[in-house]
Amino acid sequence: MAEQERIALFIDGANLYATAKALNFDIDYKRLLREFQSKGRLVRAFYYTALVEDQEYSAIRPLIDWLDYNGYSVVTKPTKEFVDSTGRRKVKGNMDIELAVDAMEMSEHLDHIVLFSGDGDFRSLVEAIQRKGVRVSVVSTITTQPPMVADELRRQADEFVDIVQLVSKIGRDPGERMERMQRYQDRRQTASAGGGFDDHNA
């Protein structure tokens, strides 16, 4: 019966990126999708990230474009720039509310939510979803110093999965990164020359 379990992924993009970087590996998002499709009926895979507007080139843009074309529901919003009390310019780009609202709305159609984040602010969200009878797994890591996952979030989850256990299933060969970026740039140039932009093979 487990193969019929309705699953959704909620990926806190900035948090997952920081976790993978701390562990020195790249995530292969195609393999990540396949891994969870094999565990049940994957209803939706959300990816949340803030984007800096008015930037000529954003390092995250190729990833966002690829995810959008390849089975992920990408949720973005522009970052906000502000000056703090000490006069320093800061950039704010928190997607917690968007993720929480979507998770609460989707929960009635799901059996299992997989949250890719270590942010302790999500503890009360996890608790609320569990009260609706939905199982919640949290994917992050305790192997870094300090751990990337907040202790209260890890304790609240029905299951904590250390992403280190998934590296062999969702990790990318580091040599692929440069190749991939080159292919992406080549396609962008072709598209701007009027050839159209097809990013299905990123």
Image (cartoon, rainbow, N blue to C red):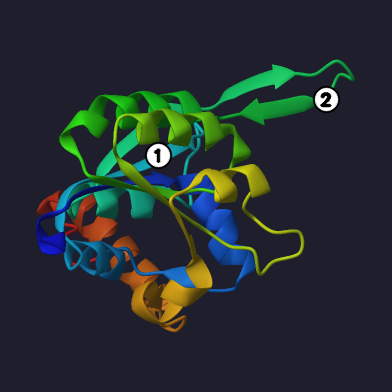
Other-residue count near label 2 (Cα within 10 Å), few / some / many at <14 / 14–19 / ≥20: few
Answer with left or right where residue 32 lies relative to residue 124: left
Q: Nearer the viewer, mark 1 or mark 2?
A: 1
Residue 15, percent from left and from top:
55, 48
Q: Is residue 23 above or below residue 98?
A: below
Residue at the image point whose x is 58% and y is 62% from the top:
141
Q: Is residue 30 left or right of residue 95?
A: left
Q: Amino acid at mark 1?
A: Tyr
* Residue 171 or residue 43, whichever sits in front: 43
**Element carrying mark 1:** strand
Residue at the disc numbered 1: 48
Q: Amino acid at mark 2?
A: Arg
Give the residue displayed 19% in from the left and 58% down from the top. Answer: 199
Disc with the residue nearer the chain's start (1 vs 2): 1
Packing grade of label 1 (10 A; few <14, some 14-19, many >=20) is: many
Whether residue 182 can be seen here: yes
Judging by the rendered image, the residue that carries numbered circle 2 is 88
Q: Residue at x 33, y 46 (%)?
A: 135
Give residue 139's position: percent from left, percent from top. Answer: 47, 57
Alpha-carbon span between mark 1 and mark 2: 26 Å
Q: Is residue 147 above or below residue 177?
A: above
Q: Could you say whether the residue bearing mark 2 is in a helix, strand or loop?
A: loop
Residue 113 location, x and y as percent?
32, 45
Q: Is residue 118 visible?
A: no
Q: Is residue 64 above or below residue 173?
A: above
* Figure quadrant of residue 123: top right
Looking at the rendered image, the quarter that the C terminus falls into is bottom left
Coordinates of residue 115 in the picture (x, y in percent): 41, 47
Label 1–label 2 contact, CB within 8 A: no
Determine whether 94 is above or below 20 in the image: above
